[in-house]
Image (cartoon, rainbow, N blue to C red):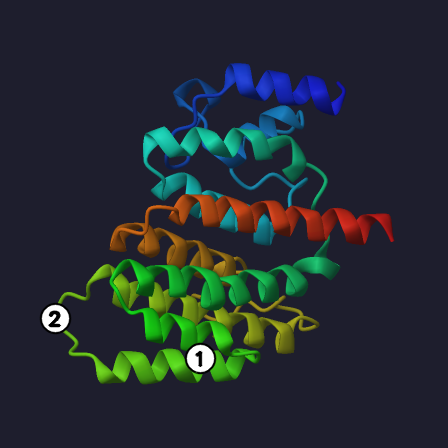
Amino acid sequence: MSIELVRVAAAEQFQLAPGNHATREEGLCAMEAVAWLAGLPHSDKPACTSEILAGYVRHLNDHMPEEERHRLVAFLPDLIGTADRELDHVLNAYLAWQALHLFAPAALRAQDYEDEAELLEKQRRDYDAEDVVDSILKSWYRPDELPPLHWALIRAHKASRLAGWFYSQRNEWSRGVWGDTSYDSCATAAAGAAYQAYRTGCPHAWDLALFVLDEALTIVKARQLE
């Protein structure tokens, strides 16, 4: 089946649902739909897709409102054939950077923290951006139940720290997995920052999240052409 026919099939067939499903008859999340398109066994972790991208997409799928979730369908065919362990640390670094420099500032602006957003965007090194996030969070009162803005910054900071740690461990037998830290934890944290930006009231949070997904796929395609 050509890629264009796959796109048509995806657009016509799928009504994506949150969560994973025991069978296709019960429903399909975005990654289960990718498995279907690729002709693979039913799974939300198809072998044809980068584990990093799959983790990012799963989190978006599960947290997008129903009216937004269908926008993922356009990306499903391009997720096929992206599995490449050599690119995992590159994708982690990219997603972490966008969490700190795109999602977190968007959340700050949604709550009228323009100066803090600009300061974060100006940082050119990950650890400097992490320090800015630490400084912002320490300056705020921390209620027992943290609001979405706090969580957006926490998730972005976590994504950055995980990207760095996984890079340092990428050649180990564990592939970066440590304790209860899953292999896609950086991607999940980055997607979580986008979700929390949405919860702060950012009107274009999902636009930003899908822009990042599109750019990440572009990175993979460029590397495959080298």
- Where's the N terminus, which quadrant? top right
Q: Nearer the viewer, residue 207 or 48?
A: 207
Image point (71%, 59%), residue name: 87
Residue type, mark 1 in image: Glu
Q: Residues within 10 Å of mark 1 (few under 14, many from 20)?
A: many
Position of residue 164 in the picture relative to residue 157 (left or right): right
Image point (51%, 38%), residue name: 44
Image point (39%, 46%), residue name: 204
State the separation of the CA atoms marked 1 and 2: 23 Å
- SS under mark 1: helix
* Residue 21 shows in this picture: no
Position of residue 129 in the picture relative to residue 149 (left or right): right
* Residue 179 shows in this picture: yes
Looking at the image, tell me whether mark 1 or mark 2 is earlier in sequence order.
1
Q: Nearer the viewer, residue 87 or 153?
A: 153
The answer to which image quadrant residue 33 occupies is: top right
Residue 212 lies, in percent from the top left, at 55, 51
Q: Nearer the viewer, residue 42 or 87?
A: 87
Residue 222 lies, in percent from the top left, at 78, 51
Q: Residue furthest right?
A: 226
Residue 130: numbered disc: 1
Position of residue 138 in the picture relative to residue 128 (left or right): left
Q: Residues within 10 Å of mark 2 (few under 14, many from 20)?
A: few
Q: Is residue 89 above or below residue 223?
A: below
Residue 144 lies, in percent from the top left, at 12, 70
Residue 141 lies, in percent from the top left, at 15, 78
Q: Nearer the viewer, mark 1 or mark 2?
A: 1
Residue type, mark 2 in image: Asp
Position of residue 41 in the picture relative to residue 225 (left or right): left
